[in-house]
Amino acid sequence: MGGPSSGSACRFVIPKASAHPYPSKPLSTARRDEGLKLREYEAEGVRYYILIYPNAQLAKIYRHDGNKFRKVAECDTDRFEFDGLPCPVSVDFGLVFRRLR
């Protein structure tokens, strides 16, 4: 992974938290990530959303299509190239999950 060839710095923007970041009833982290957080990030137009399932050693990757999130990949040992970002980004999920074993 490297930065852009122009030498400019890459910066990742984390969206502001909503006024009500958690539902009134506590949910499991996975259920909250798959539901509420996914919808909030989708509404904000976040380009990519990744759900990591460490026990299954699986990553589900969603890309915003301008309207909503669409699942574009499920990775376990693959390298995923994130396109359409200001800086080139790729993640080797085989390496990520190897470190979680």
Image (cartoon, helix red, strand yellow):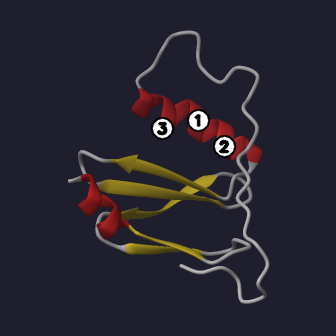
Residue for badge 3: 34
Q: Which residue is mark 1?
A: 37
- Which kind of residue does numbered mark 2 sit on? Tyr
Measuring 66% from the left and 43% from the top, which residue is drawn there? 41
Viewer-closest of 90 and 76: 90
Q: Which residue has dot 2 on it?
A: 41
Alpha carbon distance from label 3 to label 2: 11 Å
Query: How many numbered tags mark residues here?
Result: 3
Mark 2 Cα within 10 Å, few/some/many (few <14, many 20+)? many
The reply to whether dot 1 and dot 3 touch (C-beta < 8 Å) is yes
Separation of residues labelled 1 and 3 (CA atoms):
7 Å
Expressed as whole percent of the image width and height from the top left, the position of residue 20 reads: 70, 20
Q: Is residue 4 above or below residue 96?
A: below
Tell whether 15 sits left or right of 60.
right
Question: In the displayed structure, would residue 56 be above or below residue 95?
Answer: above
What kind of element bears circle 2?
helix
The type of residue carrying mark 3 is Glu
Upstream in the sequence, badge 3 or badge 2? 3
Tell me residue 89's x, y (percent): 58, 73
Look at label 1 and name its amino acid: Lys
Q: Position of residue 78 (x, y in %)?
A: 34, 73
